[in-house]
């Protein structure tokens, strides 16, 4: 099974170790090494002398492309805010939960439409199509499996994505609920609510309209 880790762009040539400068052209090569995708970023000179000829013949070679290096901006302090499509996608990829394959795919498509991600390669493995996306600004690579969603599944996945963007992966109250279940499993009875009638009143979850996914 392939490791689906996010791979960041190098800030120096990985062949000669010379630092990249703003707006410098460089080349990225993608390889399949020991069941994990590995990227190699090299400068124009090293590309011409070491990789331009015979790169496709190297063991595990998958693809290559040219990019323009952008100096990463200094990160300002982030205010507390709701999940963005990008932050949620990164968390879902790190979590690697198979049940969120559809959500990862929808989020990647959203970011592609916003021109934040670009498809750099398409692969086929174990009868599945895999898209290699590159983040336009950071150069990070995202490996996204096409879950082959059917029309009758699409609305449910879009609804799940909208809810995840609204409440996040770990909404408030999750920790308390988990603790209550653990206490009950240990043989103790959970405390009764102040109003016993409340035990039968379950609020319906607030779910954003699927159409709002397109607007995010």
Image (cartoon, rainbow, N blue to C red):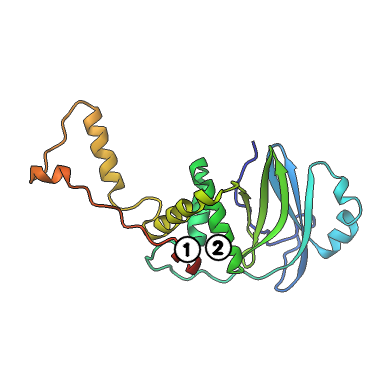
**Residue 127 sits in quarter:** top right
Q: Residue at x 90, y 50 (%)?
A: 54
Q: Residue furthest bottom?
A: 23
Q: Residue furthest top?
A: 187
Q: Residue at x 49, y 42 (%)?
A: 99
Q: CA distance from mark 1 to mark 2?
A: 8 Å
Q: How many C-alpha atoms fall within 10 Å of the one at disc 2: few (<14), some, or many (≥20)?
A: some
Residue 57 at x, y = what percent? 88, 45
Q: Quadrant of the N terminus?
A: top right
Residue 7 at x, y = what percent? 63, 53
Residue 140 vertical position relative to residue 149 in the rendered view, above or below: below
Circle count: 2
> Looking at the image, do the residues carrying marks 1 and 2 touch, with CB atoms under 8 Å apart?
yes
Residue for badge 1: 213
Q: Residue at x 79, y 42 (%)?
A: 60
The numbered mark at residue 15 is: none
Q: Residue at x 40, y 62 (%)?
A: 209
Could you tell whether 5 is left or right of 53 in the image?
left
Residue for badge 2: 110
Tell me the SS state at disc 1.
helix
Viewer-closest of 14 and 203: 203
Q: Residue furthest front?
A: 152
Residue 86 at x, y = what percent? 52, 61
């Amino acid at each position: 099974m392939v490791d689906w880790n996010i791979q960041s762009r190098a800030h120096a040539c990985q062949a000669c170790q010379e630092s990249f400068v703003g707006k410098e052209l460089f080349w990225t090569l993608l390889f399949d090494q020991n069941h994990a995708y590995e990227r190699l970023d090299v400068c124009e000179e090293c590309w011409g002398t070491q990789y331009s000829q015979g790169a496709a013949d190297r063991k595990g070679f998958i693809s290559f492309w040219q990019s323009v290096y952008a100096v990463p901006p200094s990160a300002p302090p982030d205010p507390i805010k709701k999940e963005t499509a990008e932050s949620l996608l990164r968390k879902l990829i790190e979590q690697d939960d198979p049940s969120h394959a559809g959500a990862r795919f929808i989020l990647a498509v959203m970011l592609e439409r916003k021109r934040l991600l670009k498809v750099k390669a398409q692969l086929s493995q174990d009868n599945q199509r895999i898209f290699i996306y590159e983040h336009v600004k950071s150069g990070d690579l995202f490996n996204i499996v096409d879950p082959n969603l059917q029309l009758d599944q699409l609305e449910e996945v879009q609804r799940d994505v909208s809810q995840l963007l609204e409440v996040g992966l770990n909404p408030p109250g999750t920790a308390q609920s988990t603790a209550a279940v653990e206490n009950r499993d240990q043989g103790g009875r959970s405390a009764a609510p102040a109003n016993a009638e409340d035990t039968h009143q379950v609020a319906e979850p607030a779910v954003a309209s699927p159409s709002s996914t397109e607007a995010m």
